[in-house]
Amino acid sequence: MAEQTKLLEDFSDRLDEISRDVKSCTECRLHEERRHAVPGEGDHEAKIMFIGEAPGKQEDEAGRPFVGRAGALLEELLKEAGFSREDVFITNVVKCRPPDNRDPRKDEIETCKPYLEEQIDLLEPKLIVTLGNHAAETLIGRSGMKDMHGQEFEYKGVKVIPMYHPAAGLYNPDLKSTMKEDMKKI
């Protein structure tokens, strides 16, 4: 039991260290305009990990993932599926906000990818839910949400289910029912 507690402490310490590394990272241009880097948050023993594209304006201000309107929709979807935000781990592919909420560029994704990969390796989720094309493309090398949402793929032996980004449900309310159905699969 003491050995398991020590492993959990080491594991949590390493996740905290990744957060500190992300917050002090200056490896790409995105750090130049950020207010706060957004390393991710949630249950360190979560079996489900949600991965979005990049922080938006509210996330940059708060230093937390999915706290704006898209985050509220994500929480609503989680609740309808019987989960809460506290039950999962939420992060993004890119840990700093791209200017004007533009799409993250390939070099920015590649710069942040080691942080994401280490988070995945440490958390050992049973399921990863990618939110949006950039997250899906980063992990499974595919894009085109219309054709792949709700289907199962694999990343390093972990099941991956791509979903539309919650922001898509805000801009196109017709997608909300699709997103709810995809969430039920989780």
Image (cartoon, grey):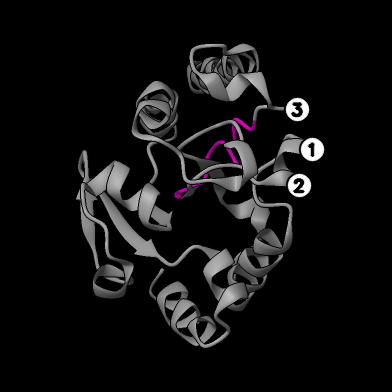
Reading the image, the residue beneath label 1 is 61
Q: Using the numbered discs, state the Cα–Cα distance from disc 2 to disc 3 in whole angstroms.
A: 10 Å
Q: Quadrant of the C terminus?
A: bottom left
- Residue hosting label 2: 58
Decide which of tag 2 and tag 3 comes sooner along the chain: 3
44 part of magenta stretch: yes
Mark 1 to mark 3 CA distance (whole Å): 6 Å
Whether residue 126 is visible: no
Which element is circle 1 on?
Answer: helix
Asked if the residue at tag 2 contacts the one at tag 1, i.e. Cβ–Cβ closer than 8 Å, the answer is yes
Crowd around label 3: few <14 · some 14–19 · many ≥20 (10 Å): some
- Image coordinates for residue 185, horizontal then vertical, percent: 38, 74
Name the residue type under label 3.
Arg
Vertically, is 96 above or below 142? Answer: above
| Residue nearer the viewer, 154 or 67 | 67
Tell me whether the residue at label 1 lies in contact with that at label 3, contact meaning CB atoms closer than 8 angstroms.
yes
Magenta stretch, overall SS:
loop
Q: Residue at the location (40% across, 21% down)?
A: 111
Numbered label attached to residue 35? 3
Q: Is residue 99 visible?
A: yes
Q: Is residue 143 above or below residue 34?
A: below
Q: Which residues are magenta?
A: 38-50
Residue sitting at 30 percent across and 74 percent down? 146
